[in-house]
Image (cartoon, rainbow, N blue to C red):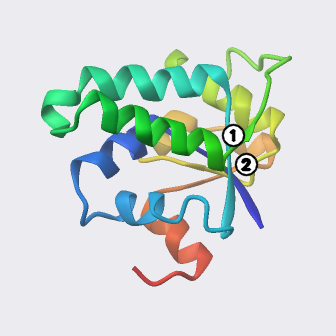
Amino acid sequence: MYRIAIDTNVIISAMRSKQGASNKFLRLLGTGKFESVISVPLILEYEEVCKRMMPALGLSEQQIEGFIDYFCTVSLHRKIFYLWRPSLRDADDEFLLDLAVEAQVDYIVTFNKKDFRGVERFNIELATPKEFIQILGVHP
């Protein structure tokens, strides 16, 4: 089973469109097809960005909190004890890499692959939601 870390841009994309690959990918959370990992900084980022974008997303605060709660329930919680900084060109992505390395994920699922160049040295691969669905062999 693959272990993955999910970038915030995938969460936002899934909330924007029920038809896109991101939404189809997130509907696979908790199905046993993969393990997602989270940390406190990642969950706080998800919550902050989603709540900031609430009007554009057309969601209520309760809907966002419900999603975050579910995400926490179906994901493996990790504590970060060692930072690998600086490793990435976008400093805002460093905490996601720290989590990915600590949890020994197989993939970071993101739309911004260019921001994660160099993660191969940690034996981590990058995939968009659509690519990861294909890796799983799930037909949308």
Amino acid carrying mark 2 in the image: Ile
Residue 119: which numbered mark, if any?
Answer: 1
Q: Secondary structure at mark 1?
A: helix
| 42 lies above or below 9 | above
Residue at image point 59% right, 74% down: 135
Amino acid carrying mark 1 in the image: Val
How far separated are the C-alphas under marks 1 and 2?
6 Å
Residue 44: which numbered mark, if any?
Answer: none
Residue at image point 23% right, 27% down: 53
Q: Quadrant of residue 132?
A: bottom right
Give the residue at mark 2.
Answer: 124
Residue at image point 45% right, 35% down: 8
Left or right: 89 in relation to 33: left
| Residue 1 place in picture, x, y as percent | 77, 67
CB under 8 Å between callouts 1 and 2?
A: yes
Quarter occupied by the C terminus: bottom left
Q: Quadrant of residue 35?
A: bottom right
Residue at image point 14% right, 33% down: 56
| Residue 129 place in picture, x, y as percent | 46, 60
